[in-house]
Amino acid sequence: MSSRHSSVPAPPLRVDAHQHFWTYTPQDYPWIDQRHGLLQRDFLPNDLKPLLDQHGIDGCIAVQARHSLDETDVLLSHAANHPWILGVVGWADLRAGDLDGQLARWADFNKDARKLVGLRHLIQDEPAPSLFLQDPAFARGMRQLQSLGLTYDVLIKDKDLHAATDFCQRHDQHHLILDHLGKPDLAQEDPVAWADRLAPLAALPHVACKLSGLITEADWQRWRPVELLPYFYLALELFGPQRLMFGSDWPVCQVAGSYSDVHHLFESAISTLSVDEQNALRGGTAIRLYGLQGNCP
């Protein structure tokens, strides 16, 4: 039989499932302080595209970085103008009584393909993240969000893993995505102890995790791959490739390393896996869980 008649499935697109764009002003991004001097400028699609091309990555998911409906507007406009921005994880106030109206604001962006694929809140920056996760108004908004088939990115630090686990147990009607491996405290806790506390969350089948954001939790100047790879390996054991996805956390990653550093660390961690498992981690999981099929060029 001629080879042109054989049907070898093409690998899924490669996706960077976590990066940010912004037009920088100090008042809009108070978390970008003097330690983050490299980030005190604009980061826009034309800055990212060469990095994606360099690493063979076909598209990305743009994630909110401030609590602003306007920022979600801008991210969706970027996605409309750049087909390789496959989806947006934006922000809306889930505690608000007019959540329907907030989401209707973006209906036009979702006419042909759903570009708004999920929402996120900077829970880690709340005065009491564990109490925020228990807010009845927030729970009402989460139920509404999940009924619409939108994902939710859970951004917490590892001290709040237990509260995040309880939260995810209560909201099991759609996918939840843990950002940055739950931000382990690399200076205070060894990988096995961290994995023991992450395990109850990873046991929930509707929860996935991003292999992202780890180098900025390490010593920015002195981190080495050998210190960070155990976290990737343990996450693979706990979640499996079908619930893990690559994210660069660009441009935030640049305070501790380049896009190439982040990508190389990820590729090192998955190098011994099967082709199917690697395909899932590189893009298949993100495409499936964020519902990106209709967005892929």
Image (tube, grey):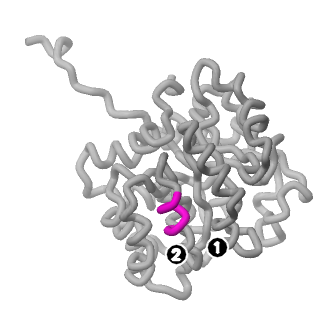
- Please state the extent of the stretch shown in magenta in the rendering: 165-170
The answer, for residue 228, to whether it is visible in the render is yes
Residue 136: image quadrant is bottom right
Q: Residue lying at the far left in this picture: please name it.
A: 1
Residue 222 in view: no
Callout 2, which amino acid? His
Mark 1 sits on what residue?
130
Q: Position of residue 241 (x, y in %)?
A: 33, 53
Q: Is mark 1 on a helix, strand or loop?
A: helix
Q: Are the residues flagged by discs 2 and 1 in contact, CB closer than 8 Å?
A: yes
Dot 2 corresponds to which residue? 162
The amino acid type of the residue labelled 1 equals Ser
Residue 220 appears in which quarter of the rendering? bottom right
- Picture coordinates of residue 138, whole percent (x, y): 69, 57
Magenta: main secondary structure = helix
- Residue 189 in the image, given as x and y percentages of width and height: 49, 86
